[in-house]
Amino acid sequence: MQQFRTLFVAITLALTTLSAAFAASPAPAEGQNGMVVTAQHLASQVGIDVLKRGGNAVDAAVAVGYALAVVYPTAGNLGGGGFMTIRLKDGKTTFLDFRERAPLASTKTMYLDKDGNPIDGASTDGYLAIGTPGSVAGFETAREKYGTMERGELLAPAIELATEGFVLEPGDIASFANGNAMLAKDPAAAKIFLKDGKPLELGAKLVQTDLAKSLKAISEEGSSAFYKGEIADLIVKASEANGGILAKEDFEQYKVRELAPVQCSYRGYDIVSSPPPSSGGLVICEILNVLEGYPISYLGYGSAETIRLMVEAMRHAYVDRNTALGDPDFVENPVTRLTSKAYAEEIRSRIDPYRAGVSKALTINGGTESKETTHYSIIDKDGNAVAVTYTLNGSFGIGKVAEGTGILLNNEMDDFTIKPGVPNLYGLVQGEANAIEPRKSPLSSMSPTIVSKDGKPFMVIGSPGGSRIITITLEAIMNVIDHGMSLQEAIDAPRIHHQWLPDKVYMEPYALSPDTLRLLAGMGYDVGIDPDWTIWGEAAGILIGGKNLKEIEAGDGARYYGAIDSRASSGAAIGY
Ligand code: GLY
């Protein structure tokens, strides 16, 4: 009998491994010379056209960034900020931080009432919620330092899309569905994004004349048009008229930071990702370092044991994220310690093998998840790889357009600690390291990541999703490396998430079987379907040399594979 049981377990394990490699899923897109994966198909086409015209991956990333500001206004932007991780063909890696900065007039308590309580909506809804935007400076810095094409060439497609308009497809209509009510409240936004106060219909053409004018000014004058010229004047004017604190000096002082990316290794793969002011790279590395000590591949995707270990690693990493990290110009981030293998060993020694760990006593409900942020991944014929995640924070930011600019404005200030212990838009409970100070950037979760193996690029990956960005990106990497999934399967597979507080394991429907749930509950885990599961982030990735690890190792794959999340409504992976 015992022999039979052993054989049964062995066959089951073998089938599990096989099914991971051959699960049903659409095939990822293929390409031999380049791949562009974005959340909006027209923007992906813009990127591919740049590559075909001889531009490199950074040129394509810049053109896509401007194009998404037109065709994906829920998150693509000129009025927000983000990060770009670059791996050049010679293996050099770098990171551009063009995140928003707190205005000079901001204060630590600016969103609290006289009794020290957060004022409802103050950090999310109005002009007071805006951080000084960085996207235009970011794209221009990237182009000047690492691109090869002229500014005008890279802005031309975005200008055309804004001037001529583009026809709204079902995916575009879906992305507007959450924003229409908010956009209707702002006359300048309603004029552009609604028709006679009603949502735009399928097949309607969205023309953005003011945005085209702003893009043309940037094309002609460079980023000074945005930071020193009429665009800054118009945004400051709108801010002053609506209770904001943005001043012309905020724009004039804005500077992009070029930083060393966070680096770590996982089972022989080299990970390069976002450093502070993002927590993303650090938290991904901390979790992977902990999990490297366990046979995740053998334990299997979605098993109670794998989930337990992932959750415990996430719990420890998110405590560090939420309490210790902040803008590197203002706080000392313990990067070396948090990414060390020794620290991972220390965490493993604290994980109880039988019972769920317990997050700090404060239990908070709340935090919503939205489509907001957007991620895109690009690789060119020479192997230069770029991962960009940028955002307005909430979907459509504050939902307001500075009159005459066509530019939607961010509500990134909500990513600061509004009050220690009080959750932000994503339910994140944060500490003093992320307190508001003039010129400081709020802590982010955005995780544009590039993985390489033996000195060659292996995977480009990232996602939107607020605090879930980190675990979405992490799970896509694990699904490829540990579970042998194809890129598309890895991105589409149902996910779980834990972020220390609330002390709850969130899952997407079907992520865990009823008996797995019972096993986890028996160990003390509070697992449930995320109430906002319909809008978990949409990852966008590229795998190099095969559609899964098996093909890469056998050396019989095409050169590039691209996958946009099946959760995405309007995206496309386009190769050539
Ligand atoms: N606003 C989302 C993030 O930066 O993490």
Image: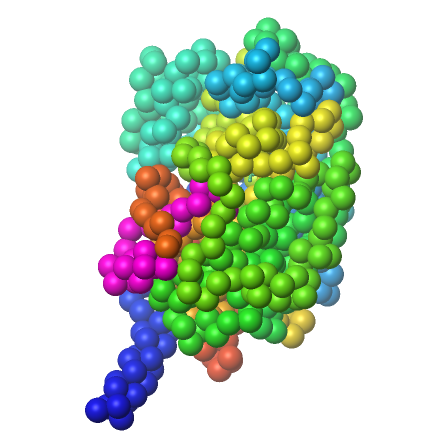
Residue furthest to the left in view is 1
- Indicate yes or no whether the magenta region holds residue 61: no
Query: Is residue 101 depicted above or below 154 in this figure?
Result: above
- Indicate yes or no whether the magenta region holds residue 502: yes
In x, y percent, where is residue 525? 37, 53
Residue depicted at 42% across the width and 60% down the height: 355
- In the image, taking residue 197 as reference, residue 280 lies left or right, namely right
Among the 4 quarters of the image, the one containing residue 66: top right
Residue depicted at 34% across the width and 29% down the height: 177
Quadrant of image for the N terminus: bottom left
Q: Give the range drawn in magenta.
A: 500-523
Query: Is residue 316 depicted above or below 107 in this figure?
Result: below
Residue depicted at 51% across the width and 79% down the height: 553
Among the 4 quarters of the image, the one containing residue 3: bottom left
In x, y percent, where is residue 84? 64, 47
Query: Is residue 389 depicted above or below 189 in this figure?
Result: below
Among the 4 quarters of the image, the one containing residue 449: bottom right
Residue closest to the eye, 419 or 468: 419
In x, y percent, where is residue 415? 57, 32
Query: Is residue 5 depicted above or below 531 in this figure?
Result: below
Residue depicted at 53% across the width and 30% down the height: 422
- In the image, taking residue 245 as reference, residue 401 lies left or right, namely left
Count of numbered labels shown in the rendering: 0
